[in-house]
Image: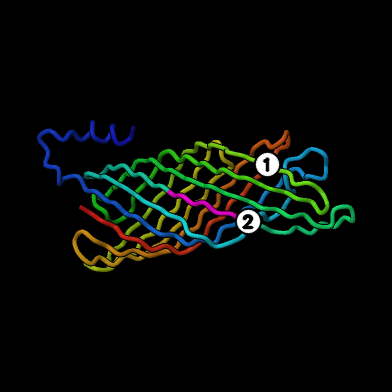
Amino acid sequence: MLFLAFSLTFPLSGMAQHEIEWLVAPYGWLPDIGLEQTGGDPGDGNGGGISGSSLLDKTDAAGMIRIEAAKNRWGVTLDYIFLDLSDSTVIETPGPVVPAIDVRADLDLTVVELGAIYRPSGTEHGVHYLFGYRGIDARKTLLITPDGAPTQRFDSDPGLADVFVGARYLHRFNRSWDVAVRGDYSFGESEGVVNLLASVGLRLTDTFTLRGGYRHVVLEYEEQQEGVRVNTEIDLSGSFIGFAFRF
């Protein structure tokens, strides 16, 4: 919808296509990923999962891509993150009845951002303000096996819709080197999402830039599992490297 609105605002008829600045930037991300859940205890008779426990803590690969189109002070942006991973852990309990619980957690996470960019400078440099829609799909499966008891399975697939607001800043030292930072926060159906990143770019040609940096994302949401309210927190922090194509 935002791309359609952009094209209606800046019609192509009578306008040279090169007046629109395009950016396509695929990245590879290697974050440390943590999944924590606070809610019902499988031993309390209500189901719902593990109470106050770290269910997943590992490093894995994720993919990201950002596509932008801008002209003068306004633009639109599409950002997509995807990862699929699993991990297992053993949770020691203080009680004598169930001394240990084996947990396997599978997480399939996608985050899609569709937003608008306001560029006071009318260029890629300086401060840009961002706002728009963030859609989150965090499909999670927990296989919980208390010591000496059958395995219990808990599936959740919350589809969350948020509104995000934020800003970014790009400073170019010279024709080749630049540094960029971004911070934003989203709210709505989630309990809040914090997104922070910083990167350095090396422009090799007018079109091609090599870019590397660090990204930190914290996602919190609440859901019902087996009639029990469960809070989930997903943390992703790590380095990324990719390419930016401007044309």
Three-letter amino acid code at the position of disc 2 = Leu
Q: Identify the element where label 1 is drawn.
A: strand
**N-term-proximal mark, 1 vs 2:** 2
**Left or right of 146 on screen, residue 245:** left
Residue extending furthest toward the left: 14
Picture coordinates of residue 160 (x, y %)? 53, 37
Residue that badge 1 annotates: 154
Q: Secondary structure at mark 2?
A: strand
* Dominant secondary-structure state across the stretch colored magenta: strand
Q: Quadrant of the N terminus?
A: top left
Q: Are marks 1 and 2 in contact (CB under 8 Å)?
A: no
Tell me the residue that label 2 is attached to: 56
Q: Position of residue 37 (x, y in %)?
A: 67, 49
Q: Left or right? Give the position of 28 relative to 120.
A: right
When asked about the image quadrant of residue 199, the answer is bottom left
Q: Is residue 153 magenta?
A: no
On screen, 197 above or below 117? below
Q: Residue sitting at 51 percent across and 54 percent down?
A: 217
Give residue 16's quadrant in the image.
Answer: top left
Residue at 23% in and 67% down: 204
Of 151 and 49, nearer the camera is: 151
Q: Front-most of 222 and 126?
A: 222
Residue at position x 75%, y 50% from top? 145
Q: Amino acid at mark 1?
A: Phe
Disc 1 packing (10 Å; few <14; some 14–19; many ≥20): some
**Left-right relation of 53 to 95:** left
- Give coordinates of residue 153: x percent, y percent: 69, 43
Q: Which residues are magenta?
A: 81-86
Q: Nearer the viewer, mark 1 or mark 2?
A: 1
